[in-house]
Structure formats: structure tokens, C-alpha cells
Image (cartoon, grey):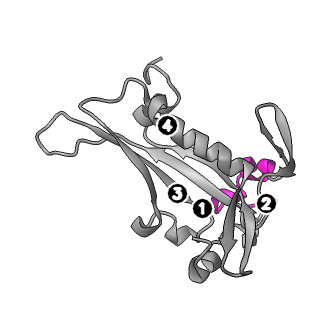
């Protein structure tokens, strides 16, 4: 997305967002995001020499999953795993063309070990925290791109599965 001039321009939304401390109008107004901006990145107990979102090109991501029955009269389920790019303007966060589809966990029932499906994503997210080389179409330069998962959401069964909890009645 940063290699395209039009998308790179749209991706500046996060860095240009001005928070109003009296209102909560955006995910970037949250105390969680504001506290991350004042936190050094730590991976495997090693503190990196950079803060979360210290570069205006750093990307904020959200993860979601939810089980659904793909067929009308069937008891089979599927669990998509999707990422949302919060660097885009809010009206574009959830548009189909901007959703990053990670994969679909197949049925016939909900997965016993959802972590095994999330593990490759976790490894890539850790690499993105450390940084990967990317091209910025606006500056026409290669830079170290960082992306951070700032929110995980879904319905109660999906969140319970992601958090490895037994059930909503515990």
C-alpha cells in the first residue's frame, strides 16, 4: 500500500490524526494507543531503541475472527482471520478492497487449537514489529516499515477462542 502514491497518501491518516482529549471519536483517541506511543518496543525481553508509532509510516492493525456457517442447511463452520489497516481514513477501514485476508480456518466445527492457525501470523507480526524494508512512493525511498497489532475483536465465542478460554459462562 505504501508503494502506491494514492494509497501512501491515504495511509497518512493515523499520523495526521489530532486527538481531542475531551472526546473519543477514533481508535487513535484511546488511552491504549496513547500509552503505546510512549512505550519502547520490547521483544523477547529485549528493549528495542524505538517507540511504538514513532515513525509516521508505522501501521496500526486490528485482528478479527468470527465463526459462520457457509451453507444454509449445514452444521459446518468456517472461521476467517482478517486484519484491518487503521492507517487508512475511518470510512475506508472496513471496505472489502482494504481488508487483509489472512486465511480461513475450516470446520466442520470450531477449531480445537485456534493458536495453531494463528502461529504463522504471530511470527509475521513479530517480524513487522522489528521492521521490514519497504518502499515509500511519496518520498521515493526505502525505509524500515513497522506494523503493530493494536486491537483484537470479534463476538464472544471468537474472542474466547482467541484467548484460549473455555466458555462465556466461566
User: How crowded is the residue under tag 3: few (<14 C-alpha within 10 Å), some, or many (20+)?
Assistant: many
- The residues tagged by marks 3 and 2 sit, at their Cα atoms, a distance apart of 25 Å
Label whose residue precedes the other's in the sequence (3 or 4): 3
Circle 3 residue: 84
Q: Which residues are magenta?
A: 21-36
Residue identified by numbered label 2: 21
Q: Position of residue 137 (x, y in %)?
A: 66, 79
Instruction: Please report the residue visible at 70 percent of the width from the left and 53 percent of the height from the top.
Output: 30
Left or right for 36, reference 128: right
159 on left or right of 52:
left
- Check if residue 43 falls in the magenta segment: no
Quarter of the image with the N terminus in it: bottom right
Of circles 3 and 2, the one toward us is 3
Q: Which mark is residue 118?
A: 4
Gap between marks 2 and 1 measured at Cα:
20 Å
165 versus 73 height, above or below: above
Crowding near the residue tagged with mark 1, few <14, some 14–19, many ≥20 C-alpha atoms within 10 Å: many
Residue beneath label 1, please?
A: 86
Mark 2, residues whose alpha carbon is within 10 Å: few (<14), some, or many (≥20)? few
Amino acid at each position: 500500500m505504501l508503494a502506491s502514491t494514492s494509497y501512501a497518501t491515504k495511509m497518512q491518516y493515523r499520523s495526521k490524526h489530532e486527538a481531542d482529549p475531551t472526546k473519543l471519536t477514533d481508535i487513535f483517541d484511546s488511552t491504549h494507543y496513547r500509552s503505546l506511543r510512549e512505550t519502547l518496543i520490547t521483544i523477547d525481553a529485549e528493549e528495542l531503541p524505538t517507540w511504538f508509532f514513532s515513525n509516521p509510516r508505522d501501521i496500526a492493525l486490528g485482528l478479527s475472527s468470527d465463526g459462520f456457517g457457509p451453507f444454509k442447511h449445514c452444521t459446518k463452520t468456517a472461521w476467517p482471520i482478517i486484519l484491518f489497516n487503521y492507517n487508512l481514513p475511518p470510512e475506508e477501514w472496513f471496505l472489502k478492497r482494504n481488508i487483509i485476508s489472512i486465511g480461513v480456518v475450516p470446520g466442520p466445527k470450531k477449531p480445537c487449537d485456534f493458536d495453531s492457525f494463528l502461529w504463522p501470523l504471530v511470527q509475521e507480526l513479530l517480524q513487522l514489529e522489528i521492521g521490514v524494508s519497504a518502499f515509500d512512493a511519496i518520498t521515493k525511498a526505502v525505509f524500515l516499515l513497522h506494523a503493530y497489532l493494536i486491537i483484537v475483536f470479534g463476538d464472544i465465542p471468537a474472542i474466547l477462542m482467541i484467548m484460549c478460554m473455555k466458555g462465556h459462562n466461566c
